[in-house]
């Protein structure tokens, strides 16, 4: 397994990314630590993961000479694009909320602007898709409205989120009862209550193997902006493995990005952070955030080409974070190989079942 | 002499500020533009009531340097080319005409490189597309007969499983 950290004196790219983003969300970020060469090495990863504007802002205006001109140009270009995307995205949010409300559906906005509003400037946290939560009973009405010509153009809208699949009707009611309205230009936008939001960000981060550094920044931003009387019991409720997992996500934000955990309860801060988890997150950050990460070639297509089997099989080997979450394993220091093997087996059985059904 | 009273186009545009720059996305042409401070101020003050001398005076009051009419014409030409004015610029102000052949390069030579940074500048930038921002598909944005596999929406003939 590739080491996530290098010999003393040389940082891995994952560590450089962590250093570049540490505290970058604050009004006054900490002193810049990276060399020209280090920043140049990670700029493509920063741009690809949507973190360019955060870093560009951090380089302004006090230390304009901490990067090569070509790097500065690339970061500035990306920051401009992010600013434009943010403006377009906000317009889409307003259109979407108006459309859904016109058909009697009240949506909840997840991620994106719901978190971006906590950053000093909203474009620092770019959004691609529009992630909306609607009650299961309103799904078909919402889907029909979002397929109509009146739907906002230029944006992909996602209304399914597995983190909420297991909720019953009463829990949906409670979720909406705890939600909050925040003003976006002329539109009141509904977002999750703080406890649900933090929990969701933790779960989402780990279910996607924490591969995008911005998601950990979101956690850090939230942790430093928690409201008074934040209900930690509600936020962390669940089975013991779940609670440990959430605590680990929170501690990751502290360890890798220097997030202040002053408002986090002692028992959460004291939860040990497994070394494999830290290492794996840094490794994930060293890979580009491209669609190749999501979508290997369909296995059914690979099966027709035996030469592609080794690559196809290897590509589907689950990382330790994903495997631990999917198999419900506790985030402790025990080796992850059993969880990875169990997850690989489960994926294979699932595939064979679908293959049999399709024949 | 003919008075030119330019008007900034406002409809079908999404506008946002980033530091000193103004970023504009044209929803009609699906193009994005970046206006530096000088160009942004010219655009923002094109209200159909100010002619070129008035624009120059207004900007001179706002900016820490003198803005002459050539600068205003340079800005207006760039804005007009990118369809950021409500109506095309009068022919007299376009480069083909003998009265408006001051180019950015000529002005830079005249002002010197240091001062040239104040010249109005409108650049087009590559605009983001929804596909570039996609993080996954689902039944809503990938309806049948397509299929959503591991975050990608695939055409029907690839949905063999």
Image (cartoon, coloured by chain):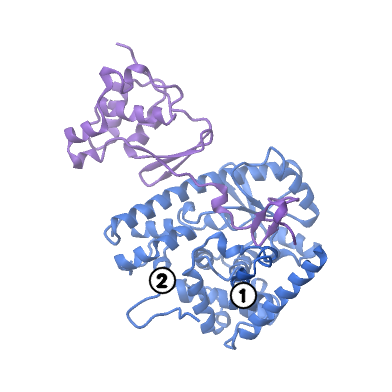
Chain colours: A blue, B purple
**Residue nearer the viewer, A114 or B137:** B137
Chain containing mark 2: A
Where does the image place residue A47, in percent across and percent down from the top left?
Answer: 44, 58
Residue at which label 2 appears: A13
Q: Secondary structure at mark 2?
A: helix
Discs 2 and 1 share one subunit: yes
**Residue nearer the viewer, A259 or A53:** A53
Whether A22 is drawn above or below B53: the answer is: below
**Residue nearer the viewer, A232 or A351:** A351
| Quadrant into which the N terminus of chain B falls | top left
Q: Is residue B32 visible?
A: yes
Q: Quadrant of residue A303?
A: bottom right
Residues under numbered marks 2 and 1 in contact, where contact means CB atoms less than 8 Å apart: no
Where does the image place residue A313, in percent across and percent down from the top left?
Answer: 63, 73
Where does the image place residue A315, in percent across and percent down from the top left?
Answer: 59, 71
In three-dimensional space, the C-alpha distance between marks 2 and 1, rounded to whole angstroms, equals 22 Å
Name which residue lies at 61% across and 82% down: A331
Chain containing mark 1: A
| Quadrant into which the C terminus of chain B falls | bottom right
Sequence-first disc among 2 and 1 = 2
| In this rendering, the label closer to the viewer, 2 or 1 | 1
Question: Mark on residue A199?
Answer: none
Relative horizontal placement of residue B102, taking residue A167 as reference (left or right): left
Residue at which label 1 appears: A318
Where does the image place residue A260, in percent across and percent down from the top left?
Answer: 47, 72
Relative horizontal placement of residue A359, taking residue A13 as reference (left or right): right
């Amino acid at each position: 397994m590739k080491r996530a950290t290098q010999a003393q004196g040389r940082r891995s790219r994952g560590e450089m990314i962590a250093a570049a983003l540490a505290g970058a969300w604050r009004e006054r970020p900490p002193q810049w630590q990276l060399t020209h060469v280090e920043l140049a090495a990670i700029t493509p990863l920063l741009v690809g993961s949507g973190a360019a504007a955060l870093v560009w802002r951090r380089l302004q205006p006090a230390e304009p000479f901490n990067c090569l001109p070509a790097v500065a140009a690339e970061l500035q270009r990306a920051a401009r694009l992010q600013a434009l995307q943010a403006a377009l995205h906000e317009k889409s949010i307003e259109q979407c909320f108006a459309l859904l409300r016109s058909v009697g559906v009240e949506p909840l906005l997840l991620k994106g602007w719901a978190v971006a509003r906590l950053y000093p400037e909203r474009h620092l946290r770019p959004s691609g898709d529009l992630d909306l939560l609607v009650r299961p009973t309103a799904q078909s009405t919402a889907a029909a409205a979002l397929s109509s010509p009146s739907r906002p153009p230029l944006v992909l809208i996602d209304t399914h989120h597995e983190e909420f699949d297991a909720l019953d009707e009463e829990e949906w009611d409670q979720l909406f009862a705890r939600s909050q309205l925040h003003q976006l230009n002329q539109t009141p936008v509904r977002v999750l209550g703080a406890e649900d939001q933090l929990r969701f960000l933790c779960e989402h981060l780990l279910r996607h193997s924490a591969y995008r550094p911005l998601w950990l920044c979101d956690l850090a931003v939230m942790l430093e902006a928690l409201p008074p009387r934040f209900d930690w019991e509600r936020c962390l409720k669940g089975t013991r493995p779940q609670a440990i997992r959430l605590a680990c996500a929170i501690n990751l934000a502290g360890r890798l990005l220097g997030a202040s955990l002053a408002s986090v309860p002692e028992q959460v801060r004291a939860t040990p952070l497994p070394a494999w988890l830290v290492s794996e997150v840094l490794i994930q950050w060293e890979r580009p955030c491209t669609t190749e990460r999501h979508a290997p070639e369909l296995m059914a297509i690979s099966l027709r080409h035996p030469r592609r089997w080794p690559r196809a099989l290897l590509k589907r080997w689950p990382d330790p974070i994903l495997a631990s979450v999917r198999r419900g394993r506790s985030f402790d220091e025990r080796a992850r190989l059993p969880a990875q093997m169990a997850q690989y087996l489960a994926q294979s059985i699932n595939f064979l079942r679908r293959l049999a059904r399709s024949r | 002499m003919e008075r030119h009273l330019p008007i900034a186009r406002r409809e079908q545009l999404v506008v946002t500020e980033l530091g000193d720059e103004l970023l504009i996305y044209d929803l009609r042409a699906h193009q994005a533009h970046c206006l530096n401070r000088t160009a942004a101020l010219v655009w923002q003050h094109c209200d159909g009531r100010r002619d070129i001398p008035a624009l120059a005076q207004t900007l001179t009051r706002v900016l820490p340097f003198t803005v002459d009419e050539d600068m205003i014409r340079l800005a207006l030409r760039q804005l007009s080319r990118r369809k950021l004015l409500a109506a095309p610029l009068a022919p007299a102000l376009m480069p083909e005409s003998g009265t408006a052949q001051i180019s950015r390069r000529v002005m830079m030579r005249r002002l010197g490189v240091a001062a040239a940074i104040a010249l109005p500048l409108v650049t087009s930038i590559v605009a983001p597309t929804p596909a570039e921002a996609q993080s996954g598909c689902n039944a809503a944005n990938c309806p049948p007969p397509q299929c959503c596999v591991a975050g990608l929406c695939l055409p029907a003939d690839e949905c063999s499983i």
